[in-house]
Image (cartoon, helix red, strand yellow):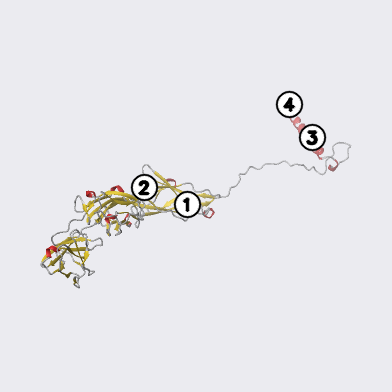
């Protein structure tokens, strides 16, 4: 018989919806069998990876097929590097199409290449003749093969009385008595005395908390389940045992079931819990060893961050516009990778993440030109930052740490510009003022005032007179040399 799923699987909301590798999803049986039957536990495995920059609190996951309903569980993904550390906490919802949501922990902060695997147990609750079931990854349907080519009918009901147990998704232990009526057809009623095994060297403590007992019967094909409501009895005050009576007549064509839950004191792998029932003098015993139902492994390289804060000082700092932007180039690796970042005075950049051990070199490009301001050599400072030639700096990224770097620029008021000077020169006057009186220029002439003669004539005459005197003296000197 084939059952139709309760509803089509839909994509859930995740920070990284494509983190699950759809091609890596597998479905196997937990008991190593080659086929799957209804209500059998199966195991789901998948691989995952999140991009660099992922931080604790962010999510990834996928949606299971509707045939795996009633999941509802939690599990952790430990670190390969340190198994005591958890990389992600995962939940599997109890929806018609269970949704797997994994939340990263702060273990991934400051790491690169974060990836891993996960696995968990689920129940094949619906039969199907299809050889594949549909997972949903990043909103896309991914068919995955089921062992044996489908989910077949449940195993036939046992013909002998049995006690079953299994772990539930919410961390409890389910116990179930299976009592074929044909084995008790000559009794007036089913009288059950059930006791939990007390804690000791081999067993861990567990107890009932809800006081519930569920009783029903079904036909030989397990297709006609009916509640049994006329039973009497109940749990003791400690939740360590109960008495139950199912009155007759007991129908030999039906199988009777009694189901109840206990809470384990520890969910440590290998912890063992026991339960013993007496049914009309027949002893039924079952022990359950607790096993992990989900897990995986996570890995990633440690990384670190750095930030850059800009500081402006100096006598010219007030002259620099407040919105001026400064550019810094940082480089790392071999061959070198170069990137630039910009920052304004009094501000800091966002965190820049790089793998731990990366050696980073910082160089400030030419600051913006500001009239009347001269820039000094830039200075990088911070823990582990060492200065280099021409104002550059270098530092090494630390794992899981943020290095706060300060870039200080000194702006100085430029001195005033003084124009160049030239030697003193004599500038001839535009006009010459003659004397007020002139000497006599010839015998028999009357004295004449300068006001009566044009200035040009007076100066011209004076010059001629001086030249004449000079020539006379020069000639006399030459005559004396010849006589000597």
Mark 4 — residue? 482
Residue at (77, 32) in percent of width and height: 472
Q: CA distance from mark 1 to mark 3?
A: 75 Å
Disc number lying in front (2 or 4):
2
Q: Is residue 475 visible?
A: yes
Viewed as shown, does residue 28 lie left or right of 278?
Answer: right
Residue 437 locus on image (x, y percent): 83, 43
Neighbours of disc 4 within 10 Å: few (<14), some (14-19), many (20+) = few
Q: Tell me the SS state at disc 2.
A: strand
Mark 2 — residue? 359
- Relative to the observer, which residue lies in front, 254 or 299? 254
Q: CA distance from mark 1 to mark 4?
A: 86 Å
Residue 217 locus on image (x, y percent): 19, 64
Mark sitting earlier along the chain (1/3): 1
- Relative to the observer, which residue lies in front, 446 or 38? 38
Q: CA distance from mark 2 to mark 4?
A: 99 Å
Residue at (13, 60) in percent of width and height: 160
Mark 3 — residue? 464
Mark sitting earlier along the chain (2/3): 2
Quadrant of the rendered image containing residue 436: top right
């Amino acid at each position: 018989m084939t059952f139709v799923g309760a509803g089509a699987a839909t994509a859930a909301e995740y920070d990284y919806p494509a983190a699950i590798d759809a091609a890596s999803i597998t479905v196997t049986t937990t008991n190593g069998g080659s086929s799957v039957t209804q209500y059998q536990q199966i195991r789901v495995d998948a691989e995952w990876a999140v991009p660099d920059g992922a931080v604790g609190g962010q999510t990834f996951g996928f949606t299971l097929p509707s045939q795996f309903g009633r999941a509802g569980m939690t599990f952790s993904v430990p670190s390969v590097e340190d198994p005591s550390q958890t990389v992600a906490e995962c939940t599997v919802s109890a929806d018609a199409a269970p949704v797997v949501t994994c939340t990263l922990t702060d273990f991934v902060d400051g790491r690169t290449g974060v990836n891993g695997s996960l696995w968990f147990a689920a129940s094949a609750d619906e039969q199907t003749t299809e050889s594949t079931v549909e997972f949903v990854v990043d909103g896309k349907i991914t068919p995955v093969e089921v062992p044996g080519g489908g989910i077949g009918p449940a195993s036939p009901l046992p013909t002998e009385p049995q006690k079953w147990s299994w772990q539930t998704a919410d961390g409890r232990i389910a116990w179930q008595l299976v009592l074929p009526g044909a084995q008790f057809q000559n009794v007036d009623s089913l009288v059950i005395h059930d006791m939990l095994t007390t804690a000791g060297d081999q067993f861990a403590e567990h107890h009932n908390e809800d006081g519930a007992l569920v009783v029903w019967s079904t036909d030989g094909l397990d297709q006609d389940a009916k509640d049994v409501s006329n039973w009497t009895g109940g749990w003791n005050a400690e939740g360590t045992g109960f008495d139950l009576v199912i009155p007759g007549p007991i129908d030999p064509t039906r199988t009777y079931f009694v189901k109840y839950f206990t809470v384990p004191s520890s969910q440590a792998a290998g912890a063992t819990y026991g339960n013993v029932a007496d049914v009309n003098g027949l002893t039924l015993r079952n022990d359950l060893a607790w096993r992990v139902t989900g897990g995986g492994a996570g890995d990633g390289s440690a990384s670190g961050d750095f930030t850059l804060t800009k500081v402006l000082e100096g006598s010219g700092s007030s002259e620099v516009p407040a919105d001026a932007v400064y550019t810094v180039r940082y480089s790392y690796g071999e061959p070198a990778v170069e990137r630039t970042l910009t920052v304004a005075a009094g501000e800091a950049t966002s965190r820049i993440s790089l793998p731990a051990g990366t050696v980073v070199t910082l160089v400030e490009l030419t600051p913006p030109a500001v009239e009347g301001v001269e820039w000094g050599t830039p200075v990088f400072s911070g823990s582990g930052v060492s200065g280099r030639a021409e104002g550059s700096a270098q530092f090494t990224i630390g794992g899981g740490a943020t290095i706060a770097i300060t870039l200080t620029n000194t702006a100085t008021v430029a001195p005033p510009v003084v124009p160049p000077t030239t030697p003193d020169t004599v500038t001839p006057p535009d006009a010459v003022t003659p004397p007020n009186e002139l000497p006599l220029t010839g015998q028999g002439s009357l004295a004449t005032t300068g006001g009566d003669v044009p200035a040009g004539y007076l100066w011209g005459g004076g010059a001629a007179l001086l030249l004449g005197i000079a020539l006379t003296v020069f000639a006399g000197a030459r005559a004396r040399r010849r006589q000597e």
